């Protein structure tokens, strides 16, 4: 966890066998979920709860703002200076200085690099 990180209420940040890195000057809005592992469910003959987790990694680079209710799934990097709009579900990498929204999150614009 970097410096000057603000995590609003109701957030879940759960590495669960995986890894999460959060850079400096990051804003995480209320009720965000960052989960670095998924349940394994490939064998229908074994209860999902008994199949364990597949670990992954989440990286939130410096100067990122995650709006309220954003969900970030495993194996995603959110690039420096990006903004992710409220309610987005991030399933792919977000390029630096991007503006991304939606389910799944998609880049809709960029921030000026000054």
Image (cartoon, helix red, strand yellow):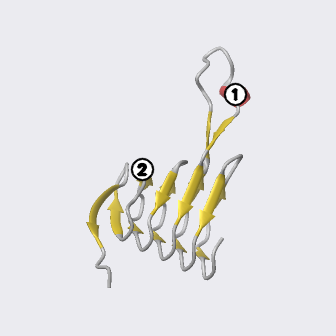
Residue 77 place in picture, x, y as percent: 49, 57
Which numbered tag is attached to residue 29? none
Mark 2 element type: loop
Q: Residue at image x 53%, y 64%?
A: 60
Which one is in front in this view, the residue at disc 1 or the one at disc 2? 2
Viewed as shown, does residue 70 lie left or right of 109? Answer: right
Name the residue tied to disc 2.
92
In front of the other: 48 or 100: 100
Neighbor class of circle 1 (other Cα within 10 Å; few <14, some 14-19, many 20+) is: some
Q: How far apart are marks 1 and 2 (CA)?
A: 25 Å
Q: In which quarter of the image is residue 86?
A: bottom left
Q: What is the tally of numbered marks visible in this picture?
A: 2
Name the residue tied to disc 1.
51
In front of the other: 92 or 9: 92
Residue 84 place in picture, x, y as percent: 40, 65
Q: Where 11 falls versus 102 (above or below)?
A: below
Viewed as shown, does residue 22 lie left or right of 71? Answer: right
Residue 12 place in picture, x, y as percent: 63, 59
Viewed as shown, does residue 57 lie left or right of 51? Answer: left
Q: Quadrant of residue 48?
A: top right
Residue 61 place in picture, x, y as percent: 51, 68
Q: Residue at image x 40%, y 59%?
A: 94
In front of the other: 109 or 88: 109
């Amino acid at each position: 966890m970097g410096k000057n990180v603000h995590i609003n209420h109701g957030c879940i940040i759960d590495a669960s066998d995986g890894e999460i890195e959060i850079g400096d000057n990051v804003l995480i809005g209320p009720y965000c979920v960052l989960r670095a592992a998924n349940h394994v469910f490939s064998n229908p003959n074994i209860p999902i709860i008994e199949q364990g987790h597949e670990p992954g990694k989440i990286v939130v680079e410096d100067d990122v703002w995650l709006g309220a209710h954003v969900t970030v799934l495993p194996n995603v990097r959110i690039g420096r200076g990006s903004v992710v709009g409220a309610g987005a579900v991030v399933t792919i990498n977000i390029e630096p200085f991007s503006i991304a929204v939606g389910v799944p999150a998609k880049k809709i614009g960029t921030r000026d690099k000054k």
